[in-house]
Amino acid sequence: MSDANRPRGLSLAWKLLFSFLTVAFVSIGTVAIISSQTTAREVRGFVLHGEQSTYAVLLKELGDYYQDHEGWEGVQTILQGSGQRGQSGQGQGAEGGRNTLLADGSGVIIIGPPVRQGSKLSLAERSSAFPIEVGNEVVGYLAPIGLGFSNPETQLLEDLQRAFWVASLIASAVALLLGVLFVKGLLRPVNELTDAARAVAGGELSRRVEIRTSDEVGELSMAFNQMAENLELSEDRRREMTADIAHELRNPLAVIKARLEAIIDGVHPLEVESIEPILEQSELLNHLVEDLRTLALADAGQLSLELSRTDLGLLVQKVVETYRPEAQTIGISLIADIPPEPSIYGMVDAVRVEQILGNLITNALRYTPEGGNVTLRLQFDSHRSKVVLEVIDTGEGIPAPDLERVFERLYRVDPSRSRQAGGSGLGLAITRKLVEAHDGSIHAENQSEGGAIFRIELPG
């Protein structure tokens, strides 16, 4: 993708940093605001507690007056006697030098500025007013007007609030620094993955990334390394297969060319005996091309199957009878091991299954010495509802390192022997693809007494 076609927008680093700082700043701001308000409330509570102590005597006198007179009639004398003198009902109090409002139990102002008398205390005034109680009943409120803080108290609150905001700014700066470091550390393996992915896309399949953590990014790094390793292995095998195919094509083409040149030059007469080797090599080429076509169809998912309910016992017997003459020619016994009753059926493509078993029998005959046995066994695994087909030989077996690779394309356990026998090296690869097309599985193993077993499992 060219730079012009790449989507535009903020990089992941900026998105992560912005998200981190947003959470940090909101958290710090919220804590600062709540702390500032809580401190102011506590300071005000402390001041109000002090004021309540100052007004304690007056509150007691007012309570006694209400109890004695059963009301607030003439209460001005109490306020005046307590030093509450003023004009127009506004007493300049001796207590604290502050103006006050006197309200009854419902909050209606009795004594105060003329414009306020008869009205009710505001919510703020009522919340800061001192209740006057007689018994367990609130009969009135004494509300200081303009109750505030003295200079030392105001200075203390301002200092505390200033300290909160300075601390918030410092915390924000620290959060910014930590956010940058955090995002940088988090994106380091991501950037390495990006560079490595670009290298692999450019053909550098040996590129790997260092796994630094065991978290999701570490798992992504492991997955990338595994992907790159598989790509490198696939590329190596592709190159090997290309070289092997070229070699397989070169040999028969060289024979055909040499034979035709000999006929043209008069070295060999133009007779049937001279042309037969050309026909044999042409058939070998045709077989190789047909095998490659089958594999290509299987890889593309276009390998068609004509499934039908098939008596697998009869099919196995048919395959054995087909290849028995070939086995007898080279001195090998080909045996069919089929349960007598009941018959075993399967939904398979009979032609493709014959091709599968034919490939395995041909392979077994190739590696079984004269006088040996090749057995084609049919069983039904009732526990797993699987049909099991086994091709068992008495040859030398398969070397352990080759057991997992015998189904690879053009892979040979003994390359020279296989070429002499005329194999294309694609038979087992085609067999695996055909088995997988039937939703089955195939694997190879060695017998303890010698020889190899190729086991096929198909849905029952």
Image (cartoon, helix red, strand yellow):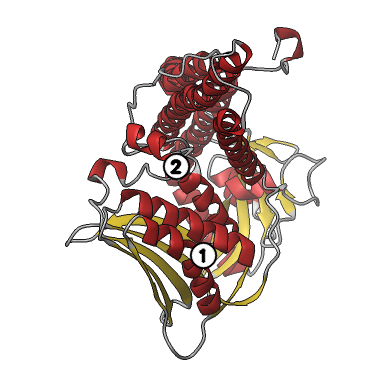
Q: Nearer the viewer, mark 1 or mark 2?
A: 1
For residue 431, above or below residue 230: below
Q: What type is the residue that disc 1 sits on?
A: Thr
For the N terminus, which image quadrant?
top right
Q: Earlier in the sequence, mark 1 or mark 2?
A: 2
Q: Give how far across and how far down residue 449 sits, in percent.
A: 17, 62
Q: Is residue 161 visible?
A: no
Kindly identify the residue that appears in the image at 34 percent across and 45 percent down.
404
Quarter holding residue 296 = top right
**Which mark is on residue 54?**
2
Kindly identify the residue that appears in the image at 75 percent across and 8 percent down.
4
For residue 430, above or below residue 322: above
In this view, the residue in front, 125 or 342, is 342
Q: Which residue is mark 1?
A: 322
* Callout count: 2
In this view, the residue in front, 41 or 460, is 460
In this view, the residue in front, 287 or 172, is 287
Q: Give how far across and how far down residue 126 sits, in percent.
A: 65, 50
Looking at the rendered structure, the secondary structure element under dot 1 is helix
Kindly identify the residue that appears in the image at 51 percent across and 20 percent down.
197
**Which mark is on residue 111?**
none
Q: What type is the residue that disc 2 sits on?
A: Thr
In this view, the residue in front, 119 or 302, is 302
Gap between marks 1 and 2 measured at Cα: 120 Å
Q: Is residue 1 left or right of residue 404?
A: right
